[in-house]
Amino acid sequence: MLARLQQFTTVGLALAALAWAAYFVQANRPGWAVVGALLIIFGYALFLAIEFVLLWFVNRSDAAPRATVFQLMAAWWGEVLTAPQVFCWRQPFRANAVPDHLPVGARRRGVVFVHGFVCNRALWNPLMLKLRARGVPFVAVNLEPVFGSIDHYADIIENGVRHIESATGVPPVIVAHSMGGLAVRAWMDKHHGDDRVQRVLTIGTPHRGTFLGRFGFAPNTRQMRLSSDWQRTLAAREPAQRFARFTCFYGHCDNIVFPASTATLPGADNRHVPGIAHVHMAHHDDVFDEILRWVGSAADDASVEPRERTALP
């Protein structure tokens, strides 16, 4: 469903830009043709800029380190470059370009990838290609319905975990971006996942909600509002020791999840990634290095001691 929607959006924007340009070129107004077409195609960069202005104000009272203006501008530009690759190419047209990798008889620890809001499995294409080249088994799920409740995604993740368990015989590493981290917590709550996962890596996950959640009205966006009832109910059921299995990547330039420290969990290994925006963070080298550290070189060598925790300021 999402791929079709983003195909329609991408093609629609391209046609709108061409139609605008053709009309004003015919009217002998080339300046209007160029400016209008550019605004249609690159207007998303203005919306991203508004998000960065908001996060700068909201993060002023947060415990995370403050971002400099240069860091914010660099993160904005990185997201301007990253967003069309993800939302206008990979997800609409390359959703199945990298299939799940479940080699027969694999005894190496695998990875389950869980994407976030308004994304699909193609978000992970670059990481999946890297893992396949290293012989690491993986499954990437699609969370549907796109605008449904986060609770509905638990069974989808369960299906992915079962596939990895069957292929490897060992608990997987779960890598989740944004809302996907909340879906993983819902899965652990419903399917008793504490003993069925080696490590959970969350990347820019609004564990305690996000300021932008107030602007959404779908069930899952309401659940991601700051300190929502859904979050409090889930947290009340979670055992205190659960988060010791988590590595939480968060950043002061995350333009979707802010205040920045809402992407951390008590007792987790909270890692601050400076100067990187929300979607771009999913492909940061630190994330990939952490995945490789936990999958190890073979299943019997995959259990390693976690690094010293990074305390949240």
Image: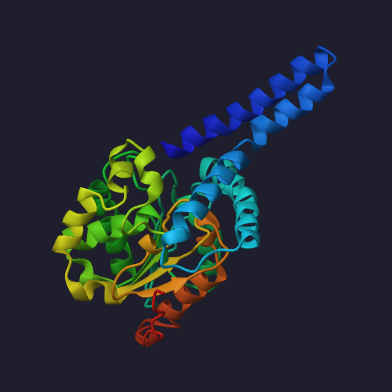
What colour scheme was applied to this rendering of the protein? rainbow
Q: Quadrant of residue 172?
A: bottom left
| Identity of the residue furthest to the top in this view | 27
Residue 151 can be seen in this image: yes
Residue at horizontal 35 percent and vertical 47 percent from the top: 143
Q: Point out residue 308 in the picture as x, y percentages from the top left corner.
A: 40, 86
Q: Point out residue 290 in the picture as x, y percentages from the top left corner.
A: 46, 75
* 267 up-or-down from 82: above or below: below
- The N terminus, quarter of image: top left
* 31 up-or-down from 165: above or below: above
- The C terminus, quarter of image: bottom left
* 137 up-or-down from 225: above or below: below
Residue 169 can be seen in this image: no
User: In this rendering, would 145 be left or right of 92?
Assistant: left
User: In this rendering, would 253 be left or right of 267?
Assistant: right
Q: Point out residue 277 in the picture as x, y percentages from the top left corner.
A: 54, 57
Q: Quadrant of residue 205?
A: bottom left
